[in-house]
Amino acid sequence: MASGVERGTRGSLDPSRWSARLASVTAPELSAALDEIAQRVHEMFPVDVVAVHVADETDGDAVTHGYCVGPSPGAQALAPLLTAEGLDPIGIGDAARRAGKPVVWPRLVSEPAEIDRLAALADQGGPAGALHPLMLDASGVAVPIGMSHAPALGAIALVSLSRDNPIHDDAAADLADLGPQIALSARNAQLAARSRRNRQTLEGVIASSRLGVIVSDARGRLSLANAAVGSLLGIDLGPMVGRPMRVVIDEVLKWRFTNPEEFGARANHVHADPRVEVVEDRETVDGRAIEYSSSPVRDASGAIAGRVDMLHDVTPSRLALADARRLAAERAQLLEREERRSHEEMALTRAAHAMASALTPGEIHEILLENAHALVATCHKSAVLAADLSRRLPATAPPGFALRTTTTAAVAAICRRLDGLALAVELAAARSAILPPTALLA
């Protein structure tokens, strides 16, 4: 007897009989799944301790353990010292995994590898002192487990704590026969745990995102919708998980957008063709500006694994853009006004300059009178003024003043023809030294 297991011939256990049992592992966490596998093995090998070890794919030193202990007092005392993570106090499984072949230890505490392990455990503050007496008479056997794409997956170990019921070599042969199915179950549990962790991580990232994220699977069914979708659209898609996206769009989503029928037809067309990618602006019934995008998700081989729809609230940026455009338009208007005012100021400046260079009407008239007096030296200014305007001698003319009609008329006509321009009148006066006014007028 090997702790209750009959010693038989090689292959005394029928692996096919236990395949279904090993395949029925359902625990979600890897350590719990390995515990279940250990329990199934314990049903076949009722020893004191069954240990299942699975190494991490990326770090061979990171090993997860699963255990099943028997009802003996020694096994029950050892159970609290066996943990899912960290250094396994029973090193025979790790020895088989690293050696890549079965390992048999007739007396565990006499093996150098186990002595070193207990010392390392003591250095880490572990319960090496309590372990040593419990394993003083322990014996064990372990075989490596692996698959074509994971050859060093882990190991399975059987340990007997009693000197009266040692583990024999026959157990290694039977355990090796079960190795492929144990490896398959352990690998499936490892992949399921990794997939669950990845999903939880992804869900955590999606949940914390301010973007609305809607994920559908390869069958076109809603898989996930984060809280931001509810915040943006004012709906809860949680009860719709598992339903076809066509139903989700027609019954819930499209009614949260303006032009719901047009949006529904467009979204259903996108989800009906896994190759379609779309990015477009939409407006919700609440007045939010939403950038809606939808694209397929592909796995490492390029196959369609699902689709993700993303909702981005671009209302602030749209408002900022509208404000920027309004400010730009106002600035353009101000610049146009400034330019027009600049032109007006330049025109006024030129006019002011022209006006500044010109004489006032009174000054022009005074010069006119002076030049007219130069044309007719004997006339008085008041008489010239009267002759220019009314051709009559004014009452203010000095006594005895006389004005020749022909000369006065010629002077007045010259002044009118020259529009009273001072410079023209001065030039005419200068010419009067050569020609009389009547000749100048001709």
Image (cartoon, rainbow, N blue to C red):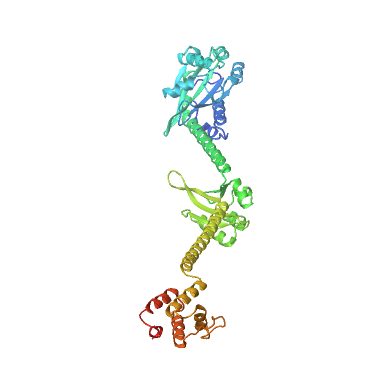
- Nearest the eye: 86 or 261: 261
Give percent across and percent down for residue 137.
53, 12
Does 299 appear above or below 143?
A: below
- Nearest the eye: 331 or 325: 331
Q: How many marks?
A: 0
Q: Residue furthest left?
A: 434
Residue 127 occupies which quadrant of the picture?
A: top right
The quadrant the C terminus occupies is bottom left
Give percent across and percent down for residue 10.
45, 24
- Nearest the eye: 315 or 215: 315
Is residue 244 in sight in this rendering? no
Give percent across and percent down for residue 16.
50, 33
Is residue 259 in sight in this rendering? yes
Identify the residue shown where x is 50% and y is 18%.
140
Does 134 appear above or below 37?
A: above
Identify the residue shown where x is 45% and y is 80%.
378
**Image side of residue 233 versus residue 273, left or right:** right
Does 440 appear above or below 234?
A: below
Residue 398 occupies which quadrant of the picture?
A: bottom right
Give percent across and percent down for residue 305.
49, 47
- Nearest the eye: 18 or 242: 242
